[in-house]
Amino acid sequence: MTAAGLGAAAAGVADADAPALPEATASKLPPWRGFNLLNKFNGRNDPFAERDFEWLAELGFNFVRLPMDYRMWIQEGDWTRFRESTLKQIDHAVDLGTRHGIHVCLNFHRAPGYTVAQPPEERSLWSDEEALRVCGLHWAHFAERYKGVSNRQLSFDLFNEPPKLAPPTYRRVVGRVCDAIRQRDEGRLIICDGRDWGNTAPTELAGLGVAASTRGYAPIHVSHYRASWMNGADQWPEPTWPIEEGGVHWDKETLQTRQIAPWQRLENQGVGVMVGEFGAYNKTPHRVVLAWMRDYVDLWTVAGWGWAMWNFTGSMGILDSDRADVEYENWHGHKLDRQMLTLAQGRKTT
C-alpha cells in the first residue's frame, strides 16, 4: 500500500453522527477539550480501546493526546527497525478518532534521545547527532504513514516536556525534526512543548510554522501533593488554594501573570497555543483541586485555548481516581467525578 493509501486507511470513515472537527493550524489551534490516553506511556504497550473514544464522544470531548514510548514499536532494541504490529495499533487509534469525532495528537513521551521519565535515554537528542537523526527517522515514518490524514484529525507533538535548554539548541533540534516530517508530508500540523518541562513559552520557535503546548500543573504543591514520583512530596503541608509556594502567593492573578500572559505573547507572534497536560494527583483535597482548576479553566477559556487533562481514567482523572473525599457517580460501571468532569468540559460549577 502507498503511504497516501495507508494514511487514508488509518483515517477511516467518520460516523454519520460524529461532530465535525474544527480547523486546526499552527498559528491558531482550536479550543479542543480532551484527555491524555496512556496506553503506550512509559513502557506500556496496550492496544487503544474503542470504549474510551466512545465515552469521550458521549461526554462531549473532541481531543486525545497519546503520550507514547518509542521502545514499544522498535524491534529487539534496534531503534532503526520498526514493529508493524504496534504501529497498526496506533493506526487504529487514529481511525477511532476519525470515527468518533476526536482529534488525535501523537506525542513522543519517550523519543529517541530524550524522556522526562526514568530511566533516561543513553544518548541525548539535544547534543548527539545520531539520536537526532534517528528521532527524525521515526517522525518521518509517522509522517509518511499518515500523509493524507487531515490536520483536523491528526497532529504531531514532537517531544514531551523538554528540559532546561538554550533556546538556540531547542530551535535547532525542532527545525531538524520538522524538516524530516515535511519531506514526507509538508503540511502536517506540528506542536512543540515549551522548554523547562513545558513551562517556558518557546519564543525561539516563532517562524518555524509550529504551534506550542503549555502545562497546567503550577503551583506544583497543589498538583503533585504526595505524588510518589516527586521527591519530598510526601513531606509537603496539605495544600490550599490560593497557596504560598516558594515565597510566591499563588492565586488566579498569579496564574494569569506567570502561566498565561507569556504564552499569549507567543501567540501574538503567530504560534498557536494549547494546554497539553494538566491535573492534580488524588491526594490533594478535592475542594482545593476544584477551586484551582476552576481558575485555570476560566483563564484558558478567555484565552481561547484548548486543553487535555492527565488523565481520563486514574489518579489524576475523572474516572476511578480513588479520591477519598468525592461522592462518585456510577457511570457505565465506573466511578465518575461529576464536578471535575464539568470543569474539564469547560462548564461552570457552583
Image: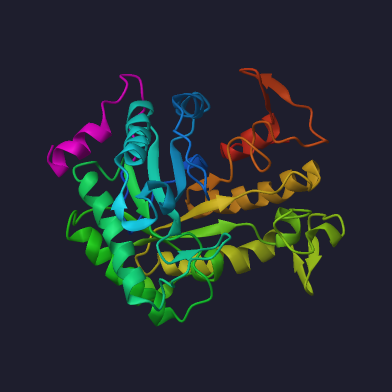
Which residue sits furthest left? Answer: 2
Quarter placement of the N terminus: top left
Q: What are the residue bounds of the magenta stretch?
A: 1-22
- Where residue 328 appears, as percent x and y from the top left, is 74, 26
Query: Left or right of 257: which side holds 304?
Result: left
- For this rendering, which residue is in front, 22 or 221? 221
Q: Quadrant of residue 197?
A: bottom right
Which residue sits furthest front? Answer: 76
- For this rendering, which residue is in front, 142 or 157? 142
Q: Quadrant of residue 336?
A: top right
Query: Left or right of 350: which side holds 68?
Result: left
Q: Is residue 272 magenta?
A: no
Q: Is residue 2 magenta?
A: yes
Q: Is residue 200 visible?
A: yes
- For this rendering, which residue is in front, 125 or 306? 125
- Where residue 234 appears, as percent x and y from the top left, is 82, 57
Q: Residue at x 82, y 54 (%)?
A: 240
- Where residue 220 appears, as percent x and y from the top left, is 70, 61
Query: Left or right of 192: which side holds 253?
Result: right
Q: Residue at x 49, y 40 (%)?
A: 33
Q: How many marks?
A: 0
- Where residue 129 appears, as percent x and y from the top left, is 32, 76
Coloring basis for residues: rainbow
Is 207 situated above or below 19?
Answer: below
Q: Residue at x 79, y 64 (%)?
A: 232
Quarter placement of the C terminus: top right
Q: Is residue 199 visible?
A: no
Q: Residue at x 55, y 71 (%)?
A: 196
